[in-house]
């Protein structure tokens, strides 16, 4: 609506137009507020996702470290078992040798 058309309107028409514009302004402000709130919620959700991802990575790192420790422990236990078996075999062979010598 141009200036010439506005000048031809009555006070009542101008008032109605003002009311309509005010209602539209309020509607748009509410829409803006809703969008701001939605954005804030999404930002928080994204932040939480980042926190969850970081926690997942930390847990994965803990699991990896635990697995490495378990592997090292198992390797050490196998070495110790091999040493015990070798010593037992050596003792058994020594006992068998001595028994054979006493028998002869």
Image (tube, rainbow, N blue to C red):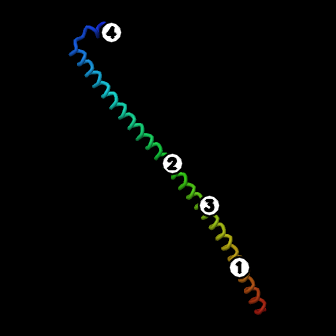
Q: Are dots 2 and 1 in contact, CB under 8 Å? A: no
Whole-Å distance between the Cαs marked 4 and 1? 111 Å
Between discs 4 and 2, the one toward the N terminus: 4
Q: Residue at x 64, y 65 (%)?
A: 72
Callout 1 secondary element: helix
Whole-Å distance between the Cαs marked 1 and 3? 31 Å
Q: Quick check: 5 above or below 24?
A: above
Disc 3 residue crowd, few under 14, some 14–19, many 20+, Cα 10 Å = few
Q: Quick check: 18 above or below 59?
A: above
Name the mark on residue 89: 1
Q: Quadrant of the C terminus?
A: bottom right
All told, the count of numbered labels is 4
Name the mark on residue 3: 4
Name which quarter of the figure residue 36 lies in: top left
Q: Are dots 4 and 1 in contact, CB under 8 Å? A: no
Whole-Å distance between the Cαs marked 2 and 1? 53 Å
Name which quarter of the figure residue 11 lies in: top left
**Disc 3 target residue:** 68
Disc 1 residue crowd, few under 14, some 14–19, many 20+, Cα 10 Å = few
Name the mark on residue 53: 2
Q: Quick check: 94 above or below 12?
A: below
Disc 2 residue crowd, few under 14, some 14–19, many 20+, Cα 10 Å = few
Whole-Å distance between the Cαs marked 3 and 2? 22 Å
């Amino acid at each position: 609506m141009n200036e010439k058309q506005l000048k031809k309107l009555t006070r009542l028409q101008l008032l109605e137009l003002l009311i309509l514009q005010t209602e539209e302004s309020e509607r748009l402000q509410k829409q803006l507020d809703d969008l701001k709130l939605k954005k804030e919620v999404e930002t928080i959700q994204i932040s939480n996702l980042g926190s969850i991802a970081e926690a997942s990575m930390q847990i994965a790192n803990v699991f990896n470290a635990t697995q490495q420790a378990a592997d090292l422990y198992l390797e050490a236990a196998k070495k110790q078992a091999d040493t015990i078996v070798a010593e037992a075999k050596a003792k058994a062979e020594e006992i068998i040798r001595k028994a054979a010598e006493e028998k002869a």
